[in-house]
Image (spheres, rainbow, N blue to C red):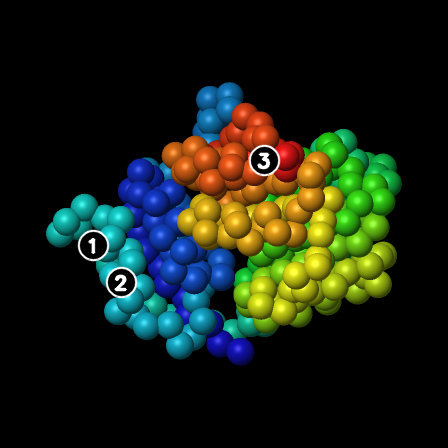
């Protein structure tokens, strides 16, 4: 399968809004690189180093309209300041092979590790999951995913039923299984995501405790003890009534895919039926957690 690669060089200040609009428009992967060969030396404590000019590369389905992508990028640029946009085509194998070479084991919480195939943690570990890099989906490196992973590691869902809404690669649900969850239900609108979730689950123990659905096929009777949803803020707001139907009093919820400035509007949608905690922020992204009333 071929994919459309879109590349554009922008100022550092444009990176976050550009990433958001590309993701909202359907980008299956977004990455950043130095556009001017500018070295970054010692960043300030807690700072996220970025270059003055950043090369943003995004992947879309090959049939995606070039014109619509240009309009999406233009929507976050100053009037008359649209940068040059480069388009190209790449194959699945090229992208996945490069990801496999670049990925390293990642630690979350005290003892949850995510490892690419053939790679092991640097030190002793008791909870390890193996994730094959897949073109469209997370391996734990993005702040939205790592926030959720740390939360799961710090709150192991032993013997609980998990709903992973917007499951992507399945990394959250598979981690929950490794941490002792009784069962995981993965939901995604993208059939490729559901395939990736099932394939990744089969590489790890507990795959027999995982089921996947497209949203319309999720049984109304499905209830969860823990809800995790790493999507986008607008979608989370729209889905609030639907997700409530799959929770019970006491269900723990963890919501991510939210920019800092979007946190209050998302939290407000869930305060109608959940006690929300103070947000946890990382690199401009937020994790919202709470308990259903």
User: Looking at the rendering, which quadrant does residue 23 occupy?
Assistant: bottom left
Q: How many marks?
A: 3
Taking the view exactly as shown, the residue that stands out farthest to the left is 80
Q: In which quarter of the image is the C terminus?
A: top right
Q: Which of marks 1 and 3 is nearer the N terminus?
A: 1
Reading the image, the residue beneath label 2 is 70
Q: In this view, does 110 lie above or below 160?
A: above
Reading the image, the residue beneath label 1 is 82
User: Looking at the rendering, which quadrant does residue 141 occupy?
Assistant: top right
Reading the image, the residue beneath label 3 is 274
Could you tell me how far apart the alpha carbons at marks 3 and 2 are, in whole angstroms?
Answer: 39 Å
Disc 3 vs disc 2: which is toward the camera?
3
The residue depicted at 23 percent of the width and 55 percent of the height is 74
Describe residue 56's horizontal placement relative to residue 151 as left or right.
Answer: left
The residue depicted at 59 percent of the width and 71 percent of the height is 191
Q: Is residue 109 above or below residue 130?
A: above
Could you tell me how far apart the alpha carbons at marks 2 and 1 are, in whole angstroms?
Answer: 9 Å
């Amino acid at each position: 399968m071929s994919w459309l690669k879109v590349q554009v060089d922008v100022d550092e200040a444009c990176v976050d809004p550009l990433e958001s609009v590309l993701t909202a428009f359907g980008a299956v992967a977004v990455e950043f690189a130095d556009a001017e060969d500018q070295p970054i030396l010692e960043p300030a404590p807690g700072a996220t180093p970025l270059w003055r000019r950043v090369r943003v590369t995004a992947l879309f389905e090959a049939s995606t309209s070039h014109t619509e992508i240009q309009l999406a990028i233009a929507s976050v640029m100053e009037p008359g300041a649209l940068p040059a946009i480069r388009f190209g085509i790449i194959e699945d194998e090229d992208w996945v092979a490069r990801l496999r070479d670049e990925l390293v084991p990642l630690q979350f919480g005290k003892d949850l590790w995510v490892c690419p195939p053939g790679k092991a943690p640097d030190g002793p570990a008791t909870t390890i999951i193996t994730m094959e890099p897949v073109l469209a989906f997370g391996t734990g490196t993005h702040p939205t995913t790592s926030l959720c992973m740390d939360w799961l590691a710090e709150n192991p869902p032993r013997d609980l039923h998990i709903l992973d809404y917007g499951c992507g690669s399945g990394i959250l649900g598979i981690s929950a299984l490794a941490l002792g969850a009784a069962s995981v239900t993965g939901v995604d609108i993208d059939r490729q995501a559901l395939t990736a979730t099932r394939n990744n689950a089969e590489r790890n123990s507990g795959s027999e405790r995982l089921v996947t659905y497209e949203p319309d096929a999720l049984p109304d009777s499905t209830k969860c003890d823990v809800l995790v949803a790493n999507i986008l803020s607008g979608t989370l707001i729209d889905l609030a009534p639907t997700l409530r139907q799959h929770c019970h009093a006491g269900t723990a919820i963890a919501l991510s895919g939210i920019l800092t400035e979007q946190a209050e509007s998302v939290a407000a949608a869930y305060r109608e039926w959940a006690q929300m905690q103070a947000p946890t922020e990382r690199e401009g992204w937020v994790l919202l957690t709470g308990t259903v009333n």
